[in-house]
Image (cartoon, rainbow, N blue to C red):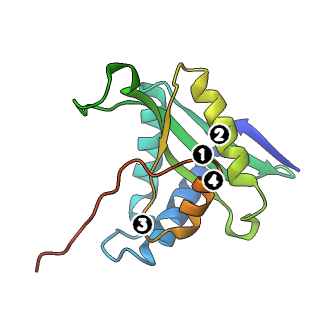
Amino acid sequence: MIQIDPYHPDDLSSLVKFVEAIQEYERRDVRWLKPGHEIADDYAATIIRNVDEKGGAILVARQDGRTVGFVSAWTEVDEDPLLQENVRQHAYVSDLYVDETLRRNGIASKLLTEIEKAMRGRRCSRIRICSKAANRAAMECYKSAGYQPYEVIFSKELG
């Protein structure tokens, strides 16, 4: 059975391991990303800092006492001058990870549901999540959880 708990400092080593795994997974398709071991410690610290400073949350998924995934989110303000004022503030899901051996078992959906509740409790009425375009599994997960594309960024190498 999966249990979703708030992040605790004892979870730091798992968080770092998961951040490294996310990076390595995305490096399969995006060759200019740095290796996971180079960014994991600093990026995990960035997540924790943003959660603390921006009214966010980190939740971890556990199965039989073992940490098997996490999600992190915080409050952001969209500076787009074309948006109505009342929708600028939103929750931003920075990262979502589930152990590869346990994917497609509803863990990501449970993490998303719980982070949505947490951020709703922080007065967010909208939530955003991003994905690398090549990460089709993530995009399928987000769409099945009710997320729809909002903005698409295109990239082209010049050289």
Q: Is residue 31 left or right of residue 82?
A: right
The percent position of residue 117, horizontal first and vertical second, equals 66, 29
Which amino acid type corresponds to the residue marked 3 in the rendered image?
Answer: Ala
Above-or-below relation of 117 to 18? above
The disc, 3 or 1, on the residue closer to the chain's N-terminal end is 1
Residue 106, quarter of the rendered image: bottom right
| Tag in front: 2 or 4 | 2
- What residue is disc 4 on? 14
Q: CA distance from mark 3 to mark 1?
A: 19 Å
Q: Residues within 10 Å of mark 1 (few under 14, many from 20)?
A: many
Please report the residue visible at 43 percent of the width from the left and 27 percent of the height from the top.
54
Q: Which residue is mark 1?
A: 71
| Disc 2 secondary structure class | strand
Tell which tag, 4 or 1, sits nearer the viewer.
1
Query: What amino acid is labelled 4 in the image?
Result: Ser
Q: Secondary structure at mark 4?
A: helix
* Alpha carbons under labels 4 and 1: distance apart: 12 Å
Residue 102 in which image quadrant: bottom right
Count of picture labels: 4
Dot 3 corresponds to which residue? 133
